[in-house]
């Protein structure tokens, strides 16, 4: 009979520990955001993690040269793609020319 109560106690305790750890991990979740960056002859973007600068992209990634985005919306499309890649895995996002083509950035 006493063993049965210990099993209930351990089960309840493990549920509490799991719940507390889950809540604490959600509080530690990073806030990732993008901002358009006007460069003078075009657009780029910045990616911030918890309001700290993480990436500054002053030109279109994955293509040679220093070509800038022609519109703010183009820059934000690629920035949001980069953020979605960052959320799927840790580290720097890699943007490919194929992805830029599918977004209509390059042709």
Image (tube, helix red, strand yellow):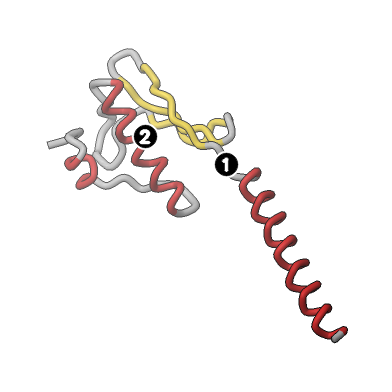
Residue under the point 74% across and 61% down: 17
Quadrant housing residue 58: top left
Location of the C terminus by quadrant is: top left
Q: In the picture shown, does residue 39 fall above or below 46?
A: above
Where residue 47 is drawn, which disc sits there?
Answer: none
Residue under the point 31% across and 35% down: 78
In the rendered image, which residue does mark 2 sit on?
79
- Kindly report the distance in space between the C-alpha atoms of the residues bearing marks 2 and 1: 17 Å
Which one is in front, 11 or 76?
11
Q: Where residue 93 sits in the image (x, y, percent)?
A: 40, 47
Proximity of marks 2 and 1: CB atoms separated by less than 8 Å = no
Location of the N terminus by quadrant is: bottom right
In the rendered image, which residue does mark 1 sit on?
30
> How many C-alpha atoms fall within 10 Å of the one at disc 1: few (<14), some, or many (≥20)?
few
Which one is in front, 23 or 34?
23
Label 2, secondary structure: give it: helix
Which residue ends up furthest to the left in the rendered image? 107
């Amino acid at each position: 009979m006493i063993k049965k109560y210990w099993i209930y106690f351990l089960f309840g305790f493990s549920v509490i520990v799991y719940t507390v750890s889950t809540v604490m991990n959600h509080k530690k979740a990073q806030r990732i955001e993008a901002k358009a960056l006007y460069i003078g002859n075009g657009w780029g973007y910045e990616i911030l993690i918890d309001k700290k600068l993480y990436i500054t992209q002053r030109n279109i990634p994955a293509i040679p040269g220093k070509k800038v985005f022609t519109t703010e919306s183009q820059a934000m499309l690629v920035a949001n793609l980069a953020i979605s890649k960052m959320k799927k895995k840790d580290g720097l996002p890699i943007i490919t020319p194929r992805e830029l083509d599918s977004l209509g950035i390059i042709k």
